[in-house]
Amino acid sequence: MVGIVFGCVVPHPPLLIPDIGRGQEQAIITTIEALDRLAQQLADQRPELALLVSPHGHSHYDAMGVLTAPACRGDLCTWGSREPEYRFDNDLNFVQLLQEEAQNSGIPLKSIGERHYELDHGALVPLHHLKKAVKDIPLVPLTFSWLPLASHFGFGQAINRAAQRLGKRVAFIASGDMSHRLIPSAPAGYSPQGKVFDEQLVEALGRFDTEAVLNIDPDLIDEAGECGLRSIVIMLGALEGLQIKPEVLSYEGPFGVGYLVASFSVQAVTSKPTVDKEMHPLVRLAKDTVENYIQNGIIPKVIELSPEMRERAGVFVCLKKWGQLRGCIGTFDPCCANVAEETISNAISSACRDPRFPPVAAQELPDLSYSVDVLTRPEPVKGPEGLDPKRYGVIVEAGLRRGLLLPDLEGVDTVEKQLDICRMKAGISPDEPVKLHRFEVKRYT
């Protein structure tokens, strides 16, 4: 078997290195023993190339990073270690393939070093423990960005495809620590949500539940003060479509930072089961539109209109991937002759023109789900007392600025939050007078 054959999550506290820890490493001996077991599991897979994503490498805010220099090196002397320097050759054939796959998928990817590269502690600490498995093979350093998690998952998928094309046995090392806020003396301060985040993430990884990881509450992520989630999401994308045996080898956090060691052994390639689900004609229209446009550049024509397609109304089309939003564009004032044409137009915009996401790539199409919201005509309301975030969507207006929010959205449970989001979207300050309109939707999934 070639391509991705193994994945792992590793922590990177320099205290794991004995001549840095100077005895303090005994407090995390469970982690050290788990890393020894992980090293043997990795060696057993006989990798020919290692990929390592570190939260502390050179990175770009708006793009993923990959080393394009022919080699990399680094040491931990600034941390007090007397260990010799590590040096690895890069695999420029893989780098070229990854650049091609990322470009085809609309994933921004930039170089993190064209002539030379110094490995950071986020790479060197794991490599110290895994060196017997990777010492004689090339290493490709990677970094993540601050793009949405969906983009990181898509980057992992591009890595998977590049690894398949390379034709070598490839291991993926996701370096990252969990919450930095587990106890009052933790480096980033204390938050009770840190423990909640770590428990959710460790439990989801133990089940290899990709959707659960991608849908962790963003507020919980912010409260956790973590540095490993994006590394993990890239790894999950790289393992997509493979039969995985997950194993959580250890988790502990005596210094206030969560240290997770987990392995993901690839058993075989598996295809996803097909689900024969009856789709509503509007949802089928949105799906067919996106697939035809992405694959063939064709905008379909609707010959036979179902009753709900004949009316004229605003329409929103939303795309999700693994349960996470992948694009959503719509109109509350209809622009087309009927709902069918409105759906076609907004389906293409959701897939290709939502500024929050890169355009959908052909490889993503099997993972997408669709919903179509048909809006009633907006009606004015005198104040917040006429709103209900579960039943009504809302439009907030101040002059030419307008913000809209659909009803029944996850996490939007109060009128106040609904209005705050609308004001923020429209650039309307909290104390500005506004006009309010409400509307209802018929949602098709």
Image: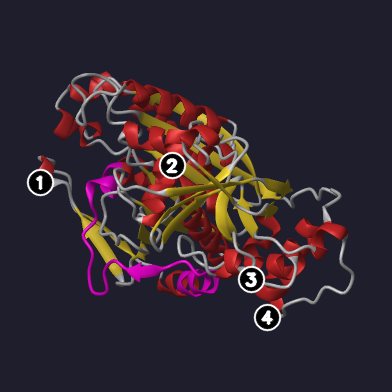
Residue on which disc 2 sits: 419
Q: In whole angstroms, how far apart are the C-alphas of marks 3 and 4?
A: 22 Å
Q: Of the two numbered discs 1 and 3 on the same chain, state the one appearing first in sequence.
A: 1
* SS for callout 1: helix
Select label 1 or label 3 by which is in front: 3
Q: In whole angstroms, how far apart are the C-alphas of marks 4 and 1?
A: 54 Å
Select label 2 or label 1 by which is in front: 2
Contact, mark 2 vs mark 3 (Cβ under 8 Å): no
Residue on which disc 3 sits: 335
Which residue is most to the bottom? Answer: 297
What residue is rendered at 73% in x and 62% in y? 287
Image quadrant in which you'd find residue 402: bottom left
What residue is rendered at 50% in x and 36% in y? 412
Disc marking residue 78: 1
What amino acid is at disc 2? Leu
Residue on which disc 4 sits: 297
- The image position of residue 354, as x and y in percent, is 51, 64
Q: Of the two numbered discs 3 and 4 on the same chain, state the one appearing first in sequence.
A: 4
What residue is rendered at 39% in x and 42% in y? 420
- Tell which of 305 and 71 is nearer to you: 305
Q: Report if residue 103 lies within the magenta region.
A: yes
- The image position of residue 63, as x and y in percent, is 37, 64
* SS for callout 3: loop
Image quadrant in which you'd find residue 190: top left
Q: In whole angstroms, how far apart are the C-alphas of marks 1 and 3?
A: 62 Å
What amino acid is at disc 4? Gly
Contact, mark 4 vs mark 2 (Cβ under 8 Å): no
* SS for callout 4: loop
Q: In whole angstroms, how far apart are the C-alphas of marks 4 and 2?
A: 38 Å
In the image, which residues are magenta?
Answer: 98-125
Contact, mark 3 vs mark 4 (Cβ under 8 Å): no
Q: In whole angstroms, how far apart are the C-alphas of marks 2 and 3?
A: 25 Å
